[in-house]
Amino acid sequence: MIVRHIDEIKNSKKEVHAENGNWTSRRMLLSSDNMGFSFHETLIYENTETLIWYKNHLEAVYCIEGKGEIETTDDGKIYKIEPGVMYALDKHDRHLLRADETMRLICVFNPPLTGEEMHDKEGAYPSS
């Protein structure tokens, strides 16, 4: 059994910060845990916009705190994000993630992340 507390992740190598300061990802389960997915708590900071395109991963996201929106770049559709909203990027949707307030999100990735990934210029993580 794997049991971890978020305080073990904070200020460790499993807490990753965006180079531009837009987000912090606390990576609680990674590929090395052999669960078939990775599990993260992510903070998206207030008044930021981040281009994301997980062309090599599927992601599901559940908002537990804060408010913002996601805009799909292919069609310009905007979806409000607030506590209780889940969205799944089932088609590798390229999108802009905007935070009106700092958002606390719970995220699951398939395939799982190794923990070292950072977004490239297209907003993607490399394939695992």
Image: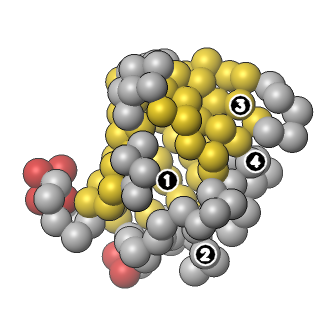
Asked whether residue 128 is in view, the answer is: yes
- Farthest-out residue, right: 75
Query: Could you say which disc has been placed on residue 108 in the image?
Result: 1
Question: Is residue 85 visible to us here?
Answer: no
Answer whether labels 4 and 2 touch (C-beta < 8 Å).
no
> Which kind of residue does numbered mark 1 sit on?
Val
Q: Real-space Cα distance between discs 4 and 2?
A: 16 Å
Quadrant housing the N terminus: bottom left
Q: Nearer the viewer, mark 4 or mark 1?
A: 4
Q: Earlier in the sequence, mark 2 or mark 1?
A: 1
State the image coordinates of residue 117 (x, y, percent, origin top left).
Answer: 46, 71
Asked whether, in this view, residue 31 is left or right of residue 85, the answer is: left
Relative to residue 63, is residue 123 drawn left or right? right
Secondary element type, mark 3? strand
Q: Which residue is found at the position 42% from the left and 43% from the top? A: 22
- Compared to residue 124, the image places residue 41 above or below, namely above
Which residue corresponds to the image point at 79% horizontal and 51% vertical from the top-left? 91
Whichever of labels 3 and 4 marks the residue nearer the N terminus, that label is 3
Q: Position of residue 115 (x, y in %)?
A: 38, 71
Q: Which residue is mark 3?
A: 71
The residue that disc 4 covers is 93
The spot of residue 38 in percent (x, y) is 44, 63
Asked if residue 106 is positioned above or below residue 80 in the image, the reply reads below
The answer to whether mark 2 and mark 3 are in CB contact below 8 A is no
- Pointer 2 residue: 126
10 Å neighbourhood of mark 4: few (<14), some, or many (≥20)? some
User: Which of the two discs, 3 and 4, sits closer to the camera?
Assistant: 3
